[in-house]
Image (cartoon, coloured by chain):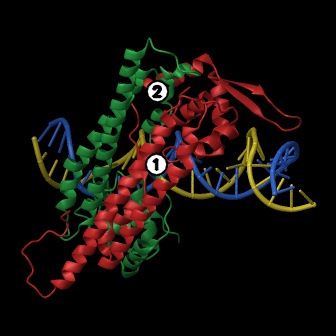
Chain colours: A red, B green, C yellow, D blue
Amino acid sequence: MKLKPPSYLMLGMLRLGMRSGYAIKKAADVSTKHFWPTSLAQVYPELARLEGAGLVTRRDDSHGSRARSSYELTAAGEEALLAWLRSTRDAPPQVRDERLLRLFFADALPRDDQIQLVRRLSESDRLAASWIRTEILPLAESAEPAGTRFPAAVARLSADIYAYAAEWLAAFEAELAAGAARRVTRSQGRDSPRRRDNRR
Amino acid sequence: MKLKPPSYLMLGMLRLGMRSGYAIKKAADVSTKHFWPTSLAQVYPELARLEGAGLVTRRDDSHGSRARSSYELTAAGEEALLAWLRSTRDAPPQVRDERLLRLFFADALPRDDQIQLVRRLSESDRLAASWIRTEILPLAESAEPAGTRFPAAVARLSADIYAYAAEWLAAFEAELAAGAARRVTRSQGRDSPRRRDNRR
DNA sequence: GGAAGCATGTAAAGTGTTACATGATTTT
DNA sequence: AAAATCATGTAACACTTTACATGCTTCC
């Protein structure tokens, strides 16, 4: 059986103390969502697969007529997780960002719209940064088990990257605005030869 | 007909002067790949769809027995592109990064392996940054048509973000190493209460 | 009593990639 | 002459998401 990143997400979450598929999904939504989104329709079949492979064990934990399965890592499961954590080959990160695509083609827009677009991107990144800092970091920092530091580190890294991008874009916006202003004040002057517009 | 981001990728690339499906794919591989990967199996059907919707026109441009279709934006196509560029609602960026997932669960590793993992991530980000700077930025800067600045700006932003992440991770690595060193020098000291085993 | 959350699962639809198939042209 | 690149397209496969279906428990 071939284990893929979603499999390791399950194993890792179980190791962090999540016991039901539902709990895994809930935890993933407030922790790994930004770099590895997951849906419930993936969680349940994957847990079943892992049970079949002997990497997790299932125990019935129903309360009355309310069904619940409680999962636990087996020794083989923990080993598989550790082996993956130590492995050096990983698929290159996949990003699909419609906003960057828009920015890429922004030359088609008039200057004013370009500036607004860049401002929107900057603001959305700033928002993402503060959202991670206020909504996700605190949860990661107070997470069980105590002594777990990497979930918080990843949250901090993500937030800092978003904040950095927001600043970068704000500077770029200022540059665009300055160029537009210069353009207005100088518009009657001579055109400097082969001046590159895209100087940072 | 509903237009999705891949549709706008086609429209935008056509506007930048690409004429064949093959050319679009080639251009995308050295420019938009990092934030919007595309495969040929998407390009051809999508161009056909756009032609059906009247947003592009196809002209036969075969050389001898070698088939080639040449596409061009229609007025409606250009309008659709501009409308999308101005639109303010976009899907949140999707990231799937196995390396971050690994980092997230790194508490399960002994300290030395944690440090190595973080170092690998830092190096891979530094590599990504320099790859974009040397392989992609120059192409974007010299790209037709002259006056096009945003492709280069996006490349710079991406490279700078990777470089920032690389530095962040290098600092984190140093912190982990310092913690490990402190631990060694202090290892005979008192044991703090409730210390978890996975601190290592 | 109603709303929100807990909990599990399946089916269908959508989206995207890899591999296949084909053949011409250009470069080495 | 062989290899690489140009060029187009399809079919099969893989992966995910959305929507559906169901019903309990806890909080307001």
Amino acid under disc 2? Leu
How packed mark 1 is, by other alpha carbons closer than 10 Å (few <14, some 14-19, many 20 or more), is some
B34 or B61: which is nearer to us?
B34
Q: Which residue is mark 2?
A: A85
Residue drawn at x 19%, y 79% as measured from the top left: A182
Task: Read off the chain for label 2.
Answer: A
Residue drawn at x 19%, y 48% as measured from the top left: B134
Q: Is residue A95 left or right of residue A107?
A: right
The disc label shown at residue B95, or none: 1
Amino acid under disc 1? Val
Q: Visible in this render: residue B71?
A: no
A83 or B5: which is nearer to us?
A83
Provide the secondary structure element on which disc 2 rests: helix
Task: Read off the chain for label 1.
Answer: B
Q: In the image, is residue B182 above or below residue B92?
A: above
Q: In the image, is residue B94 above or below residue A83?
A: below
Where is residue A6, by image quadrant? top right
Q: In the image, is residue C3 above or below residue A1?
A: below
Q: In the image, is residue B192 above or below residue B88?
A: above
D7 or B183: which is nearer to us?
B183
Q: Is residue B160 left or right of residue B107?
A: left
Q: Visible in this render: residue B72?
A: yes
Point out residue B159 in the picture as x, y percentages from the top left corner: 28, 50
The disc label shown at residue B77, or none: none
Disc 1 from disc 2: Cα separation: 19 Å
A184 or B80: which is nearer to us?
A184
Point out residue D1 in the picture as x, y percentages from the top left corner: 15, 37
Residue, far top? B188
Tally of numbered tags: 2
Where is residue C14, by image quadrant? bottom right
Residue drawn at x 47%, y 23% as measured from the top left: B109
